[in-house]
């Protein structure tokens, strides 16, 4: 099912009121029809190649020719000009719809990798493979992306600290970040002890552990969701009465297993969308993280 988001305040928004004043009740209704049509046919909100007449035909506008589009431009619901229109701030208000093409492309890549291997997938989708390579090799060595309370790189411009990585570390970064020795490896310790020792030794907890990122890329789990899994993992083995007594010799491998087996329940696979989606637990972790970052 394809859908689109409409903010509950749209009825009282000044733009909508102006649209109604100029075009009557049919103006706002046709605007909603345009949103729905775009979600189904132009999921990125860009109406490239469409004239004003094309736009009005798409929503069955029955008023004066050109009036609907001209008014949308005038009040600010539509940007651009004839043949190059776009719905104003579409990606911001409809991020799920705006990302439909990217999700479809990613799903195809995952399916190809699963059934034919990466080399064949790269041959079939060379442009996508090039973008993945470019993203991986251009990512600078990040600070420990697995330290929630400490400063690190944000995936988008933000005044608050954000440890969510926008892409797995590059191979060069991993080579320098990968710990040469784990001060606790070989002896079983609790998570608290392990994390304390790791930090005391100047090493990174998980961000330099390449197997996690390799697995995430292989199966198509977004890198930032690995961070959410780490937040839940750290919370469980730090504060849970039973879990904080667990002892393991290699906590990095334990986290990798948690990611592979979905222990944290952060994401689930959607057959309908052929991609992963955040679960309620994942959304709660995201909201908690955003709240924590915003308070800093």
Image (cartoon, grey):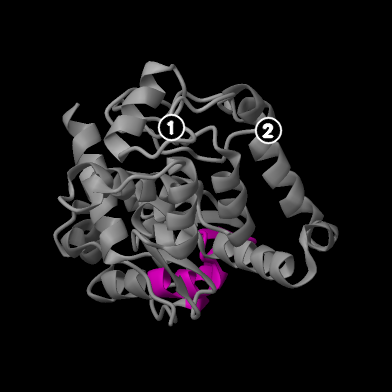
Label placed on residue 171 = 2
Image quadrant occupied by the C terminus: top left
Residue 88 appearing in the image: no
Mark 2 lies on a secondary structure that is helix
**Above or below for 65 versus 94:** below
Residue 113 in percent (x, y) is at 72, 64
* Residue at 59% in and 45% down: 211
Side (left or right) of 80 relative to 232? right
Residue 24 in percent (x, y) is at 23, 71
* Residue at 18% in and 55% down: 13
**Above or below for 166 versus 160:** below
Between 59 and 234, the one nearer to me in the picture: 234
For marks 1 and 2, the one nearer the N-term is: 2
Between 249 and 4, the one nearer to me in the picture: 249
Side (left or right) of 215 relative to 289? right
Task: Evaluate if marks 1 and 2 touch, with contact meaning CB atoms under 8 Å apart.
Answer: no
Between 196 and 85, the one nearer to me in the picture: 196
- Please give the range of residues in magenta: 34-58
Residue picked out by circle 1:
205
Mark 1 lies on a secondary structure that is loop
* Residue at 54% in and 67% down: 42
- Magenta highlight on residue 48: yes
- Magenta highlight on residue 127: no
Residue 132 in percent (x, y) is at 68, 46
Residue count near mark 1 (Cα–Cα under 10 Å), binned few <14, some 14–19, many ≥20: many
**Above or below for 217 versus 279:** above
Side (left or right) of 139 relative to 2? right
**Above or below for 281 versus 202:** below
């Amino acid at each position: 099912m394809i859908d689109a988001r409409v903010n509950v305040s749209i009825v009282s928004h000044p733009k909508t009121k102006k649209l109604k004043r100029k075009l009557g009740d049919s103006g706002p209704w046709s605007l909603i029809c345009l949103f729905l049509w775009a979600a189904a046919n132009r999921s990125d909100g860009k109406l490239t190649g469409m004239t004003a007449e094309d736009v009005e035909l798409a929503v069955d506008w029955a008023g004066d020719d050109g009036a609907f589009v001209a008014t949308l431009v005038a009040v600010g619901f539509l940007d651009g000009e004839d043949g190059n229109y776009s719905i104003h701030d579409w990606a911001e208000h409809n991020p799920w719809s705006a990302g439909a093409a990217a999700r479809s492309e990613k799903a195809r890549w995952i399916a190809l990798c699963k059934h034919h291997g990466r080399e064949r997938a790269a041959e079939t989708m060379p442009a996508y493979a090039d973008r993945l390579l470019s993203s991986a090799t251009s990512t600078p060595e990040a600070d420990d992306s697995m330290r929630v309370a400490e400063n690190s790189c944000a995936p988008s411009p933000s005044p608050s600290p954000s440890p969510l990585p926008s892409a797995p570390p590059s191979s060069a970064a991993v080579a320098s970040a990968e710990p040469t020795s784990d001060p606790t490896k070989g002896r079983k310790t609790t998570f608290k002890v392990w994390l304390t020792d790791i930090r005391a030794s100047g090493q990174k907890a998980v961000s330099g552990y390449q197997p996690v990122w390799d697995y995430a890329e292989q199966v198509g789990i977004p890198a930032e969701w690995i961070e959410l899994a780490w937040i839940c993992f750290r919370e469980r083995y730090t504060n849970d009465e039973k879990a904080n007594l667990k002892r393991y010799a290699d906590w990095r491998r334990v986290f990798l297993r948690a990611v592979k087996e979905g222990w944290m329940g952060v994401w689930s696979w959607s057959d309908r969308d052929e991609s992963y989606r955040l679960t309620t637990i994942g959304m709660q972790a995201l909201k908690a993280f955003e709240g924590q970052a915003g308070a800093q």
